[in-house]
Image (cartoon, rainbow, N blue to C red):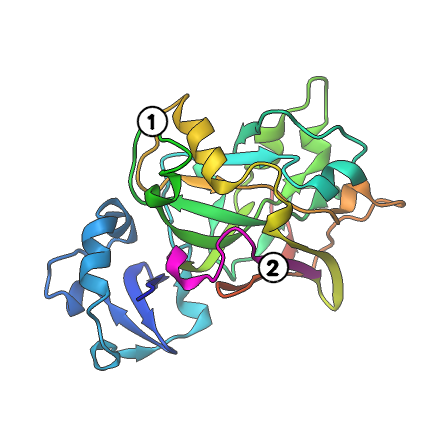
Amino acid sequence: MSVRFANVKGRASIVIGDRVADVERASKGKFTSDPMDAVRRWPSLLDWATGLLPGDTEAPLIDGDLGAPVPRPLKVFGIGMNYRAHATEAGMPIPTAPVVFTKFPNCISGPFVDVELSSGHVDWEVELVVAIGKGGRGISEENALDHVAGFTVGQDISDRKAQFADTPPQFSMGKSYDTYGPTGPLLVTLDAFKDPNDLELECWIGDEQVQGARTSDLIFSVSSLIAFLSRRCTLTPGDLIFTGTPAGVGSTRNPRRYLKADEVIISTIENIGTLRNRCVASTL
C-alpha cells in the first residue's frame, strides 16, 4: 500500500483519504512528531504506516495546515537543462552529463507559502522533486529507486537578474532566496504511480497555463541522477533533488515574461497534488 506523508502544522502525519493520522500519537510514541525524524527513519516508518487504517486518523486534511514535507534537508540539488524541450527552447545542446547546482536549504518552503519577489526578473520552474529515504554512496542506477522515500512537487523559483548578473552565472544564489523552493503538498511513495518515470506536470500563472509536460521527457532519469550524485557525495535521508523543469519558463519567451506581485503560481503533478503560491513584493 502506498504511503502519503505530510507535514501538518510541523508534525509528521500520514494522509489516508481526506484525513490525517498524527505519526507520534498514532504510533504511541514509537516515532516523534518531527517530520525530519520520520524521513531519517523512513524504512521503519513505512513498515508501520502501511498498517494504518482509516480509523487511525484524527482530523481532516486542511491545505492551510500543510508545510514542506521535508522541511530541513541537509542537501538540496538542482538539475539544469534536464528536459529535451527545455534545452531546445533555450537554444542549448542536449547535455551529455547532468548539470548540477545547489539550492541552499533556507529556500525550502511549504506548498501554500507566499513567494517574495526579489526583483522584477523572477521566473517559475515546476519540477518533480525526489526525497532520499535511504542514504548511500556509489548507488547503482539499477538499485537507485530503492533509495527514494517518495516524490513531491516543487518550484525552483529563480531570480534571473541575480542568476545572470555576471560571467560565469551564479545559479545557486539566484535560486536560493527565502521562499524560492516551495514543495509539497505531500510526499508520495513510488508504488502510488503506475509508472514513476512518466508523470504529467503542469504550471499555471493564474488562469494561464505556462508549462505542461511529462517526466518521460527527462534527459537524465531519477535513477541516473541518484547514481551520478552518489558517485560524488554520500546521499543522506532527506536530501532533495529538484530534477529539472520542462519548457515554458518566462526567460525564454519573446518578450520575456516574469512574475508579478499578486500573481498565483499553480504547480501540479499527477497523483501528488498542487502547490499554490501567491507572489508578493519583497520587504527587503
Between residue 247 and residue 274, name the one nearer to us. 247
User: In terms of secondary structure, where does tag 1 sit?
Assistant: loop
Other-residue count near label 2 (Cα within 10 Å), few / some / many at <14 / 14–19 / ≥20: some
Residue found at x 23% / y 77%: 53
**Residue 170 position in % (x across, y down):** 63, 25
* Residue 33, visible in the rendered structure: no
Query: Is 5 within the magenta?
Result: no
Please give the residue where the numbered disc 2 appears in the rendered image. Answer: 200
Name the image quarter holding residue 62.
Answer: bottom left
Q: Is residue 155 left or right of residue 263?
A: left
User: Disc 1 versus disc 2: distance between alpha carbons?
Assistant: 30 Å
User: In terms of secondary structure, where does tag 2 sit?
Assistant: strand
| Region rendered in magenta | 188-204
Residue type marked 2: Glu
Please give the residue where the numbered disc 1 appears in the rendered image. Answer: 234
**Against 166, is 61 above or below?**
below
**Against 256, is 21 above or below?**
below
